Image (cartoon, rainbow, N blue to C red):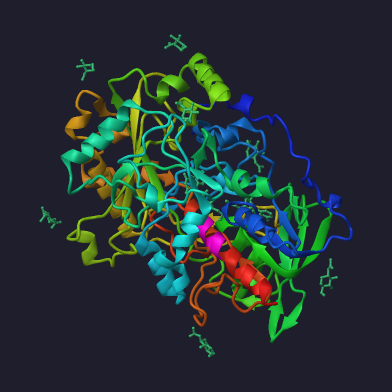
Amino acid sequence: MIFSYRTAFLSLSLAARSALGVLYTDPSQLPASSHYDYIIVGSGAGGGVLSSRLSEISTAKVLLIEAGLNPAGVEATEIPFLGPDLIGTPFDWNFTTTAQAGLDGRSIAYSRGFALGGSTSVNFMVYTRGSEDDYNRWAKVTGDSGWSWNSLQPYFKKMEKLVASADNLSQSGKLIPSIHGTSGPVDVSLPGFQLVTDNLVIGATADFPTQFPFNEDMNSGNTIGIGWVQYTIGGGQRASSFTSYIQPALSRSNLDVLINTQVTKVMQTGTSGGLPVFRGVQFGTSANGPLYALNATHEVILSAGAVKTPQILLLSGIGPSAQLSKLGIKTIVNNAHVGANLQDHPLLSSQYSVNSTATFDSISQNATLAGEIQEQWETSKTGEFTLGPANQLGWLRLPKNSSIFKSTADPSAGPTSGHYELIFTDGFVSFAIPSPSTGNYFSLFTNVVSPSSRGSITLASTNPFAAPLIDPGLLNSPFDIYTMVQAIKAGKQFMTASAFNGFILEPYGDFAAAVTDAEIEAYARTYSTTVWHPTSSAAMTSVNSSGGVLNPDLTVKSTVGLRVVDASAFPYVPAAHPQTAVYILAERAADLIKAKYASS
Ligand SMILES: Cc1cc2nc3c(=O)[nH]c(=O)nc-3n(C[C@H](O)[C@H](O)[C@H](O)COP(=O)(O)OP(=O)(O)OC[C@H]3O[C@@H](n4cnc5c(N)ncnc54)[C@H](O)[C@@H]3O)c2cc1C
Ligand SMILES: *[C@@H]1O[C@H](CO)[C@@H](O)[C@H](O)[C@H]1NC(C)=O
Ligand SMILES: *[C@@H]1O[C@H](CO)[C@@H](O)[C@H](O)[C@H]1NC(C)=O
Ligand SMILES: *[C@@H]1O[C@H](CO)[C@@H](O)[C@H](O)[C@H]1NC(C)=O
Ligand SMILES: *[C@@H]1O[C@H](CO)[C@@H](O)[C@H](O)[C@H]1NC(C)=O
Ligand SMILES: *[C@@H]1O[C@H](CO)[C@@H](O)[C@H](O)[C@H]1NC(C)=O
Ligand SMILES: *[C@@H]1O[C@H](CO)[C@@H](O)[C@H](O)[C@H]1NC(C)=O
Ligand SMILES: *[C@@H]1O[C@H](CO)[C@@H](O)[C@H](O)[C@H]1NC(C)=O
């Protein structure tokens, strides 16, 4: 593993202090007489919301099946600062991509959360809703105005509880309180510890008011500009779909949760109106162990995420018949789009050495200091350990006259969506090169957020316990590499702002030698990775469209009794960190499912 940041104290933090008693940890523990109205597969951003909202129906019995572990009491999943350290631990599926043509043929690690809470138990907690144009495009391509920015407003408020940051930082001028929710399950706050670089980054926007404007709240619908990061953090601790939705619902007698268990396929239980009904699930704990089966009275809902949901559909005979027949899987619903249309955001981290002795590097290089900061967090939930990886970031567009638009239509959703993102970190963080053991650094992340490239999830084998082939298609289109190069050039220009004088010293490593466009492109292909935002591998389209996998109500086309509620459903990846969009999608899905239950 090339990623080596802040690992010294992680092992200590991985052991659970306590465990919950109300979970089934093996399928053999499920009572023989169990029957469920809803069976939810996967407990991440999508499945976590559903388990809580559907168990609000007092007369419905809900089962949530999760492949991964219980994170309760595991400090590394609670301490925001340790988020990046969870990569490659027992809380990670440890996927790997196929060889990426856009990355000089490299295969890269592809992290996904393996826990209650799914990737929200391991992610970096950045809270961005996305833009007005992102959601309006969803509404347009699905023909369902319910997915528009305006229609979804009640759900944005419903999920969110805006709380004070760990150090009670004034919100004035850093976000717009009136657009936020105040009583939802998910805590949201500004960064909980102030850094020297905060004033430098915000100050630098004043040097470039047109090119890099300050944005007071990037969650207003217009994302464009640079501003303060909002995090799914409350009281100095990570807020995940586990802590926000699942844990509070565990005391309900109509919700059962089964962990350490993988659903291997969904099963046809009959035919209705000429369509196959899929209300059965098969599950187990290992390829050689026993398999179990259950049928839901109402629905089976796949929330296994953008990698595993299409894999389950394919293993169940829902997918391209040519691919399935090669593996001897009988096609029940022939749909060429299952696993196609995968989208992700390519990410590159570049560093500068800085004139400081107090960056995150000082913590990762000094176990004594790290121990003191951990103790402070344990005692008062304050200090640097309450921080996510960056206090500021921004969303920016290519100039309208950019040469790429002569040959490529703009793949972004519209003027409120960025083409690229800049993220500013007060220390050395890279997912491609090891951190130096000495020195202090500043990291500039560049991220292509409206990519035109499309990848895929396909089956590698019929073994449900093996990973599928994951091809996110990173930097695999002329637009995406052009945008990455322009983002790096823009980022370099931003770093020349007078606010950084005397702080930023010089570019580090191969970044220093990447000067011409050709050199920057080669540098980007050598070092780019992912920001782990796979989406759209089982996309929704309009009701009568023959493209796509889902209807606008998230039911699987040409089936009965089966829905998908997770990031695979997005028609397009939003120009945003996508956890919030999944929470919102699932909040609306819960209401659609409840309405159907009420009318049944
Ligand atoms: C390292 C990392 C950092 C990230 N940082 C951010 C960030 O800062 N901000 C942001 O907005 N987004 C971030 N994301 C992305 C965000 O977390 C995801 O987009 C979001 O969690 C996706 O929700 P989901 O429900 O689609 O899938 P997930 O949250 O991944 O949940 C899927 C769940 O299904 C389970 N599962 C899979 N297969 C099976 C099976 N066969 N049977 C049973 N269970 C199964 C999985 O174990 C998992 O718990 C990050 C992701 C990662 C990995
Ligand atoms: C991921 O890798 C780590 C480190 O090797 C390992 O401990 C963990 O069990 C792996 N995760 C899974 C789900 O197998
Ligand atoms: C923040 O404010 C709360 C409530 O007023 C108080 O209890 C807490 O001690 C304050 N925290 C800090 C770090 O000042
Ligand atoms: C599920 O339904 C199918 C079709 O009716 C039936 O054959 C099967 O036995 C059922 N499975 C369980 C566990 O009830
Ligand atoms: C490491 O941190 C400790 C505790 O803050 C401090 O006393 C010590 O000087 C630091 N060591 C170095 C080499 O900076
Ligand atoms: C785009 O327009 C700007 C401002 O008018 C100009 O400075 C720049 O050179 C133009 N770029 C291209 C690629 O034409
Ligand atoms: C480093 O910072 C100090 C104090 O802020 C300043 O005096 C000095 O000139 C800076 N050094 C460089 C090389 O910019
Ligand atoms: C879809 O097709 C059906 C049958 O042709 C038709 O009744 C219905 O109006 C169409 N729906 C939409 C949204 O176009």
From this view, report whether residue 468 is shown above or below residue 375: below
Q: Is residue 455 visible?
A: no
Which one is nearer the viewer's eye here, 65 or 194?
Answer: 194
Q: Which residues are magenta?
A: 583-588
Is 585 one of the magenta-colored residues? yes
Residue at 72% across / 83% down in the picture? Answer: 272
Quadrant location of the C terminus? Answer: bottom right
- Residue at (55%, 74%) from the top-left corner? 551
Q: Position of residue 539 (x, y in %)?
A: 51, 68
Q: Is residue 487 left or right of residue 428?
A: left
Q: Is residue 11 above or below residue 275?
A: above
Pinpoint residue 228: horizontal percent, then vertical percent.
35, 40
Q: Which of these two is toward me, 597 or 459?
A: 597
- Please indicate whether residue 566 sits to the left or right of residue 268 in the image: left
- Magenta stretch containing residue 528, yes or no? no
The single residue placed furthest to the right in the displayed view is 32
Q: Ligand 6: which quarter?
A: bottom left
Is 466 located above or below residue 337 in the figure? above
